[in-house]
Image: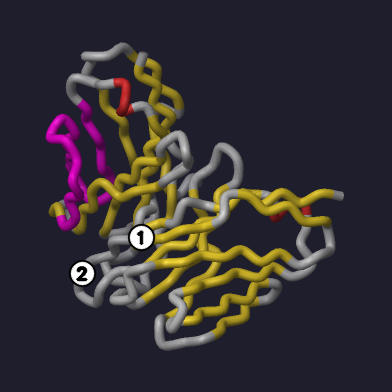
Amino acid sequence: GEDVEQSLFLSVREGDSSVINCTYTDSSSTYLYWYKQEPGAGLQLLTYIFSNMDMKQDQRLTVLLNKKDKHLSLRIADTQTGDSAIYFCAWGPFIGGGNKLTFGTGTQLKVEL
Amino acid sequence: DTAVSQTPKYLVTQMGNDKSIKCEQNLGHDTMYWYKQDSKKFLKIMFSYNNKELIINETVPNRFSPKSPDKAHLNLHINSLELGDSAVYFCASSQGAGATYEQYFGPGTRLTVT
């Protein structure tokens, strides 16, 4: 958490787009991830982006990476009530350093009707 | 057909006790992990094993001792439990230890120390 910061809460209306932001300080890793945690459950990998990419789109999900500003974002299009969860960004490992992930502080997304 | 399972789901115990949390994965993965999530949802890795060998050992009190009897199991034993150990502990596994392997998480064990 001390290396990766996220805003705590985000509330959107169903059908709107959600944008969850993440700011990191350690720029030496290779992969960045977005995980979703539903109430009472473990984390589920949503998507990831390699550090030499600027954008990745996967159905309703768009990941943007701004390496200059050390900023990662996740956009969810047409947000649904089932998207309500906590979203964690995570900063991937060094090459050869094992799969050691550093997680952000998490953003609670609430989708209202 | 649960992929990563943990037992127990809830654990309430008193300070000073010793307890264990068990984790099993049926995915055939080589690498397993323990994470701790505190009350503020901050998630931090504790340990990782690859083919039963310890590869990640973060700054964790030595009261915590992981044990991997085989590739499918990674248990966490905690001695002399303290109030600050109260958290949700997640087990995870991945096919390998490299960066591109997705980690699959268990449902978590909520430990409450009173």
Residue denoted by label 2: A97
> Looking at the picture, how far across and down is residue A63, in whole percent?
57, 76
Display colour scheme: secondary structure
For residue A5, side relative to residue B95 (left or right): right
The residues colored magenta run B55-78
Q: Residue at x 77, y 56 (%)?
A: A12
> Looking at the picture, how far across and down is residue B90, in whole percent?
39, 42
For residue B36, side relative to residue A33 (left or right): left
* Residue A62, image quadrant: bottom right
> Looking at the picture, how far across and down is residue A56, in whole percent?
56, 82
Q: Residue at x 40, y 41 (%)?
A: B37
> Looking at the picture, how far across and down is residue A15, in whole percent?
84, 63
Structural crowding at the residue carrying mark 2, measured as other residues with C-alpha within 10 Å and reported as few (<14), some (14–19) or many (≥20): some
* Residue B114, image quadrant: top left
Q: Is residue A13 above or below residue A55?
A: above
The disc label shown at residue A3, or none? 1
